[in-house]
């Protein structure tokens, strides 16, 4: 029954489109414009993939250090306020999601943990490549 309910909710959600300004009202002076919201959607989506790897509640091994450094450098390199806001939103969303769950961490040196971390490093670098390209592309469009 739960699976059916979840399927119906997902099908309904997929078929429903909510206006991007549904929560803003008509005459609200909002420093983050509708255009900023639209431009930031891809960055927020990509960040939502990499943030759980960077801020892993179970910690990371030294093998992950280059990814952590690359993420920190990426965030530091952002020059547009809206991009910093997007990253803050993505991190706040992650922190909220993590506040709702209890995490059982695997053994850090277990072979499956190390294999998972190798995969996460590859995925994180791929996502960071896309984020870098996106920010460069958006900077070129705004000039």
Image (cartoon, rainbow, N blue to C red):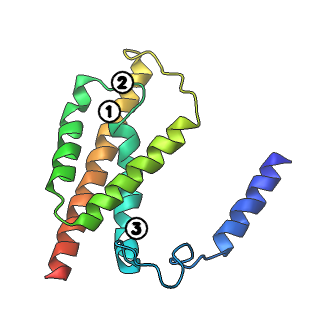
Q: Secondary structure beneath disc 2?
A: helix
Residue at horizontal 23 percent and vertical 45 percent from the top: 71
* Residue 32, x across and y down, in percent: 36, 71
Q: Residues within 10 Å of mark 2 (few under 14, many from 20)?
A: some
| Horizontal side, residue 109 vs residue 74: left or right | right
Q: Quadrant of the C terminus?
A: bottom left
How far apart in space, not on screen, are marks 3 and 1 (Cα)? 28 Å
Give the residue number, with chain letter if any, for mark 1. 118
Does residue 84 lie above or below 73 as drawn? below
* Residue 108, x across and y down, in percent: 39, 17
Label 3 vs 1, first from the N-terminus? 3
* Residue 24, x across and y down, in percent: 51, 75
Kindly check if marks 3 and 1 are in contact, taking CB atoms under 8 A apart as contact: no
Which disc is residue 114 wearing? Answer: 2
Kindly check if marks 2 and 1 are in contact, taking CB atoms under 8 A apart as contact: yes
Give the residue number, with chain letter if any, for mark 3. 41
Q: Nearer the viewer, residue 137 or 90?
A: 90
Q: Nearer the viewer, residue 129 or 142?
A: 142
Where, by quadrant of the figure, is residue 129 drawn?
bottom left
């Amino acid at each position: 029954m739960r699976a059916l309910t979840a399927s119906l909710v997902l099908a309904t959600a997929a078929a429903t489109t909510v206006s991007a300004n549904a929560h803003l009202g008509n005459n609200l002076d909002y420093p983050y414009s509708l255009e900023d919201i639209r431009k930031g959607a891809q960055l927020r989506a990509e960040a939502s993939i990499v943030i759980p790897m960077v801020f892993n509640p179970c910690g990371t091994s030294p093998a992950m250090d280059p990814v952590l450094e690359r993420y920190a450098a990426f965030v530091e390199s952002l020059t547009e306020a809206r991009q910093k806001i997007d990253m803050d939103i993505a991190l706040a969303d992650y922190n909220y999601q993590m506040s709702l769950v209890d995490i059982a961490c695997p053994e850090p040196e277990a072979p499956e943990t190390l294999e998972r971390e190798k995969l996460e490093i590859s995925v994180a670098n791929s996502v960071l490549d896309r984020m870098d390209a996106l920010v460069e592309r958006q900077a070129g469009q705004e000039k």
